[in-house]
Image (cartoon, rainbow, N blue to C red):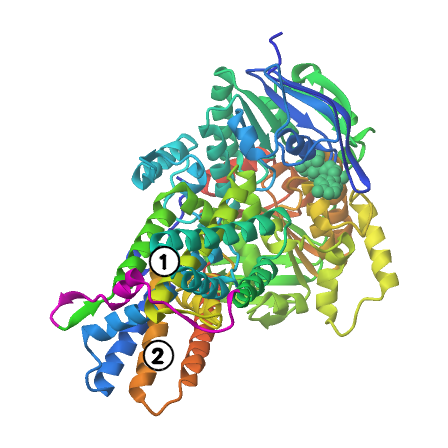
Amino acid sequence: MAEAILRMTGIGKEFPGVRALDGVDFRLLPGEVHALMGENGAGKSTLIKVLTGVYSIDSGEIELAGDRVAFTGPLEAQKAGISTVYQEVNLCPNLSVAENVFIGREPRRFGRIRWREMRRRAAELLTRLDLAIDVAKPLSHYSLAIQQMVAIARAIDVDARVLILDEPTSSLDAGEVAQLFRVMRRLKEQGIAILFVSHFLDQIYEIADRMTILRNGRLVGEYVTAELPQVELVGKMIGRELAELERLDERPPARTSDTLVEATELGGRVAPFSLTIREGEVVGLAGLLGSGRTEIARLLFGADHAATGTLRIGGDQVTLRTPRGAMARGVAFCSENRREEGLIPELTVRENLILALQARRGWSRPVPRKKQDELVAKYIKALNIRPDNPEMLIRNLSGGNQQKVLLARWLILEPRLLILDEPTRGIDVGAKAEIQKLVVELSDGGMAVLFISAELDEVLRLSHKVAVLRDRRLVAELPNDDTLTTDVLMETIASGGAK
Amino acid sequence: MKTLALPRQLPGRLPRNYLPVLVTGALFIAMFTAGGIRYEGFATGQIILNVFIDNAFLLVVAVGMTFVILTGGIDLSVGSVVALTTMIAASLLPSTPSFLVILLVLAIGGVLGAAMGAIIHYFEIQPFIVTLAGMFLARGLCYTIGTDSIPINDPTFTAIAQTRIDLAPELWISPTVLIALAVVLVATYTLHYTRLGRNVYAVGGNEQSALLMGLPVARTKIAVYTISGLCSALGGLLLSFYMLSGYGLHAVGMELDAIAAVVIGGTLLTGGSGYLLGTVLGVLVLGLIQTVISFEGTLSSWWTKIVIGLLLLVFILLQRLIVTTGVSRER
Ligand SMILES: Nc1ncnc2c1ncn2[C@@H]1O[C@H](COP(=O)(O)OP(=O)(O)OP(=O)(O)O)[C@@H](O)[C@H]1O
Ligand SMILES: [Mg+2]
């Protein structure tokens, strides 16, 4: 076996009240893709931040190519040849795409930035990732997925010896992931060591050579991917057998009940579509990124205005102008974009959880503290939010746990229609099963759910019917019977519903 | 390609960021035209040049302020540093060669700025608080030098004060205008063509991201306050050329004029968006308001403040509008 390029030994890191890392050993070989695995809050991102100098380490040592190092920040780590994409997209929304790729190492002549050259090279680099966008536009102009690709482009362009990707695929669709994997394989062949984090087990088995598993900040072990079956991996990650996942496979029976939402030729940023959602029904929305799934959700939530068509909720014809109006009619929307639209980082878990409920009641009638504590305790347990301390600041939670809090915020409302946009993104396998179970329970209790997810098997497992979108157009509505499989769905998406 | 979906082009292919600058430019032209129609002898080139001459020092100070505001910070100390500069210059000039005095005050301004920047960054204290302290400190230092106005009789300073540079018959500027314009040019180049300039925008866009992207955030933040300090000192020198005196009560409230000019010029107070051209236009608009009010004759000069106040409000509302309508995005 080749000499390790990176070796971390006995790494410990403590935050007030949380031991995030406890004596973790880790090594990375040149020319391998190494997956760092673990549940939400296991310490993966912390290990990466400790390595790249974002946090200082409490104990242990780090060796890069045999030399002992202790970086004081990402800049130093970058100079030493460690290129990192952190978990949340960390770019500057106000700068152009080209600048976001190159800032800090812009092409220059006599100290003068060569803008044209920079834009040319950025466009070239993004083409390698199959992304043809206008690189002169500000980054904020583009979706999260494109931003993610830009962050990746930035990281792979430097002459790095070590490339770290913390959940780079969480907001990408299958085509983009394939593109990323192609690039990763090429880099690997050049001898670059790649550290990869993802909660998509399929992706891990496709790309990773070896893996290191963490649990509660402790090292579980280091394994060769091909020698560790998936079930065992999950067992080692969550420390117990995962029976829940299997049980869910029986689809809940379809019911006949009253129509709750009826959209007729409703259109705006999507082509006019018609869709009905009944009480207690789970309707899945399938389609690629940018196919208009989120736009439909935003129309039903009053976040975008309808240009055409009519909408009836609970029998009444309504014109939604604001989300408040939709909320008053019992619609709740859990957005895919938690960082920008969802959480307030300086508030505690409890405050974030209660926020939407409080907003609906009006600020003059505070939710009694006892009720708050009850609700919060219930959902922390139901979604396995960790650490289970309601008074923790939300920004100190791991990415996946933040996502769970956001989800719980809308569940607490017990709406009539719950719109979930990618609710399980960035969430570990165990919690994913919990969330799916919860959705089934809620719909059994009469709640209508519009479920948006890039993972087709998840859509299939939960939905009574699936609406397929392509190019901002609703192309098919399929009842979820025995003949509907992920392959059929995939084909419908690809063919645009034309038989 | 599927990711390339209907680009919603803005009219004229101009980034929406330029909109506030354009509005300020249009406002300036409108004010000038209106003044020309209403008052005899208003619509001359010299009126505009006079605005430059009377506000050269404000322009330089506003340039420094633009750097700071672009990072999302604020510098309240500039007016006091201007006053301190005039005071130090006036008190030293009788006994010290003028070029030494100039170098010394510039150094003092830069060091003060750098110190404030370092405190803001390393102790993570609000820029508002730190520069407020700097404001009191600099103003206080003026009075330790003297409580009265000190006249400047130095030959170099008086020469600069009295020089007129003729551009054409009936059109002239002072050397201070040239200095101010040179500062604007250098600063524009810095902001758009150097790494320091781009880092300023990046820090203003998202400081945490800039850090994780490996940009030198500490250096950038300290640099902008240093630049602001330098600009204030230079502004102070220009003011002493203009006033030929040093006085602890010079430039009271100037920090607010500078901030107003930057904001009217379209730079977002939250940082990350804005152009120096806007700041130049902002200063011109402020100057032109004063000119109009002096032409009006009967209006008290307090009307200047009222108009500036209203303008600020309008511009902040305009920016709000641009920011909120600008968030929709492509996939
Ligand atoms: N700045 C911080 N202050 C306090 N606690 C923190 C901080 N950052 C992380 N933690 C805690 O450290 C633990 C590990 O978090 P980390 O972000 O490393 O998890 P992760 O494995 O990356 O999870 P995920 O899959 O959800 O991204 C969590 O319990 C988290 O709450
Ligand atoms: Mg993480």
Q: For disc 2, does the CB lie below 8 Å from ligand 1? A: no
The amino acid type found where label 1 is placed reads Leu
In the rendered image, which quarter contains the N terminus of chain A? Answer: top right
Which of the labelled discs sits on residue B290, or is there none? 2
- Residue A251 appears in the rendering: no
Q: Mark 2 falls on what kind of element?
A: helix
Instruction: Give neighbour class at mark 2: few <14, some 14-19, many 20+ (Cα, 10 Å).
Output: many
Q: Report the Cα–Cα distance between label 1 and label 2.
A: 22 Å
Q: Chain of mark 1?
A: B
Q: Identify which residue, A1 or A268, lies in the foreground.
A: A1
Ligand 1 is located in which of the four quadrants? top right
The amino acid type found where label 2 is placed reads Gln
User: In the orientation shown, which residue stands out farthest toward the right?
Assistant: A370
Instruction: Give neighbour class at mark 1: few <14, some 14-19, many 20+ (Cα, 10 Å).
Output: many
Q: Chain of mark 2?
A: B
Which of the labelled discs sits on residue B276, or is there none? 1
Residue A303 figure quarter: bottom right
- Compared to residue A268, the image places residue A4 above or below, namely above
- Residue A439 appears in the rendering: yes
Image side of residue B254 versus residue A335, left or right: left
Magenta segment includes A421: no
Residue A5, image x, y percentages: 59, 16
Range of the magenta residues?
B145-169
Q: Mark 1 falls on what kind of element?
A: helix
Q: For disc 1, does the CB lie below 8 Å from ligand 1? A: no
